[in-house]
Image: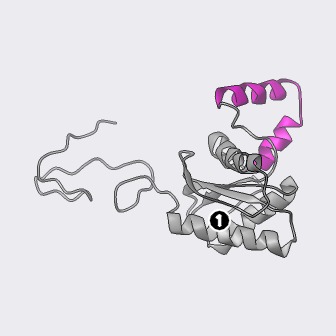
Amino acid sequence: MQIAPLRLGEGSRGESRAGVRPPLRPHATHRTGFPMSLTLEQANRIIVAALAKARALKLPPVGVAVMDPGGHLIAMQRQDGLSFLRIKVAQAKAYSALAMGTHTRHLATRFEQGGRTEGFFTALNALSGGNVITVPGGVLVHAKDGTLLGAVGISGARSEDDEACAVAGIEATGFAVTLDG
């Protein structure tokens, strides 16, 4: 893909005052031209809903991390009493889902197969600086049209409960989750 040079007088939203339009991007973008991602407000709403689910289930303290599609942290919160390492685990769960393009539940299933798969995940963990986690609790966030918007990672309770809270947070804010595929 060849990128047209910016010309003096060209607007930041793609409008052209000099008669040159920037090339179309192959992925969904905000009106600003940047790749689609969850906003800070959306990330915070996911966190609030996920923490509400944790309270409703009477879980031990959890931490919630929300990342954009590039694995950058958008927002993070932890409940009082959560151990300090758990929030890093929550971030690693979100990161792992994004890095591998699937929910960490699927990574856990693959890891349990052992053999070469175990070696593969050991290598991934080394390549990522220790940020690959192969237990449930990292869930991808999609727009209704299927566009990847980011991921949620939760840690502090049983991994299956972490995942349930992540799904609840995502669905409560109107985004899509598909855990079976």
Residue 173: x and y in percent read 62, 72
Colouring scheme applied when the structure was drawn: one colour
Element assignment for label 1:
loop
Q: Closer to the camera, 75 or 160?
A: 75
Query: What residue is shown with label 1?
Result: 176
Q: Is residue 64 left or right of residue 144?
A: right
Residue at position x 69%, y 44% in the image = 92
Please state the extent of the stretch shown in magenta in the rendering. 104-128
Residue 63: x and y in percent read 73, 58
Quarter occupied by residue 149: bottom right
Q: Is residue 7 visible?
A: yes
Q: Residues within 10 Å of mark 1 (few under 14, many from 20)?
A: many
Q: Is residue 16 magenta?
A: no
Q: Is residue 144 visible?
A: no
Amino acid under disc 1: Ala
Residue at position x 29%, y 47% in the image = 23
